[in-house]
């Protein structure tokens, strides 16, 4: 059988095993199996991490032979990791343990106590995740694109002053409340980004990558915060972490102005590639990014499972 064990994220040994699975998957797949928000939720105690291990031979609830004795896995060996809570499941199987039924067995066990309505991310639109989604009655609900652009980018065609805006760095002591309010307005229909609080912002400011100079704030002639381009630089990759403009500025070119300012900043910071994530159905932003030269790099799919009459699935 496959065994799921909830772990305390402050237990250094078990957390190292959890992180080891994630690191192995990232190295093999080229992308992380858990998004940043999921890991923040684990650290904050809002969601629960699990290790997936090979247990003694047996049968699952449907009478099917289970993984350990099929593939000869060492009992107790870590074969995967998962995160549960807040109506979402994140699941990854270690690369060397894939294609042996561990994912099926683990997901079946996770679903026994999961809420009727549930979401799950498939980072990289992994074919194994697609197969599991079909078997367990999940349907694709959202598609998130990661787009990339080599740096330096082409020269900016518009400057902030000519557009009637000024751009400067984020000031935590005075800008926090205004930014949280503007972000909530801009992303009112976004289930993750729009829900960020001052505490969430503070947690990100505590991250080693945070630099207030990489958090570009746009203001109008009256000094009102009307947009932002928050950048995240780690190694050679410079991410457009989140870009937002006040709805009142629609058509004024502020999004392009902020993008050009952000790309120039990433180039100054030594990044060789700019990256960003965007909802595939956000046609305006996608068009803007493509017009700046960004191309698709990876695709993430969020699956949704509604209540199913057979609760064993």
Image (cartoon, helix red, strand yellow):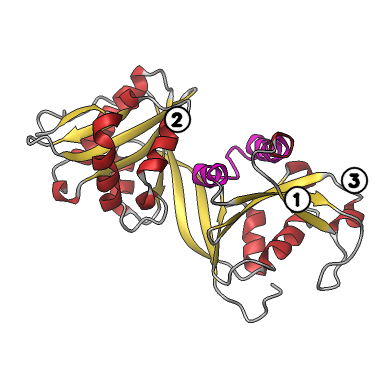
Give residue 165's position: percent from left, percent from top: 13, 33
Which residue is at 73% across, 39% downward?
Answer: 14
Q: Name the residue under label 2.
A: 206
Q: Give the range drawn in magenta.
A: 16-44
x and y percent of residue 233 in the render?
A: 43, 26
Q: Is mark 1 on a helix, strand or loop?
A: strand
Question: Which tag, 1 or 2, sits closer to the chain's start?
Answer: 1
Compare marks 3 and 1 and give the one earlier in the sequence. 1
Q: Nearer the viewer, residue 156 or 172?
A: 172
**Residue at 57% in and 76% down:** 307
Q: In which quarter of the image is residue 230?
A: top left
Q: Residue at coordinates 70% horizontally, 40% vertically from top-left?
A: 21
Q: Name the residue under label 1.
A: 52
Foreground residue among 85 and 58: 85
In the rendered structure, does residue 29 fall within the stretch colored magenta?
Answer: yes
Q: Which of marks 3 and 2 is in front?
A: 2
* Residue 125 among magenta residues: no
Where does label 3 land, which residue?
Answer: 74
Element under label 2? loop
User: From the image, which quarter does the C terminus lie in?
Assistant: bottom right
Lower position in the chain sequence, tag 3 or tag 2: 3
Distance between mark 3 and mark 2 Cα atoms = 40 Å
């Amino acid at each position: 059988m496959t065994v799921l064990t909830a772990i305390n994220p402050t237990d250094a040994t078990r957390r190292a095993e959890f992180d080891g699975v994630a690191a192995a998957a990232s190295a093999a797949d080229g992308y992380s199996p858990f998004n940043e928000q999921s890991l923040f939720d684990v650290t904050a105690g809002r969601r629960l991490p699990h290790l997936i291990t090979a247990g003694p031979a047996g049968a699952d609830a449907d009478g099917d032979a289970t993984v350990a004795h099929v593939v000869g896995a060492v009992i107790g060996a870590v074969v995967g990791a998962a995160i549960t809570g807040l109506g979402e499941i994140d699941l990854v199987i270690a690369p060397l343990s894939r294609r042996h039924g561990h994912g099926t067995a683990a997901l079946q066990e996770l679903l026994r106590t999961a809420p009727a309505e549930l979401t799950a991310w498939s980072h990289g639109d992994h074919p194994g995740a697609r197969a599991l989604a079909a078997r367990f009655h999940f349907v694709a609900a959202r598609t998130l694109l990661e787009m990339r652009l080599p740096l330096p980018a082409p020269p900016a065609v518009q400057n902030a002053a000519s557009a009637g805006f000024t751009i400067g760095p984020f000031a935590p002591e005075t800008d926090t409340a205004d930014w949280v309010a503007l972000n909530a307005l801009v992303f009112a229909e976004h289930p993750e980004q729009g829900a960020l609080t001052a505490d969430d912002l503070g947690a990100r400011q505590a991250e080693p990558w945070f630099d207030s100079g990489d958090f570009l704030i746009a203001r109008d002639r009256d000094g009102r915060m009307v947009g932002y381009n928050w950048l995240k630089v780690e190694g050679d990759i410079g991410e457009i972490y989140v870009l937002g403009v006040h709805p009142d500025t629609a058509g004024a070119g502020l999004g392009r102005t902020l993008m050009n300012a952000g790309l120039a900043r990433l180039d100054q910071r030594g990044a060789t590639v700019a990256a960003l994530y965007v909802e595939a159905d956000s046609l305006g932003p996608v068009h803007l990014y493509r017009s700046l030269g960004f191309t698709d790099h990876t695709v993430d799919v969020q699956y949704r499972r509604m209540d199913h009459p057979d609760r064993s699935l």
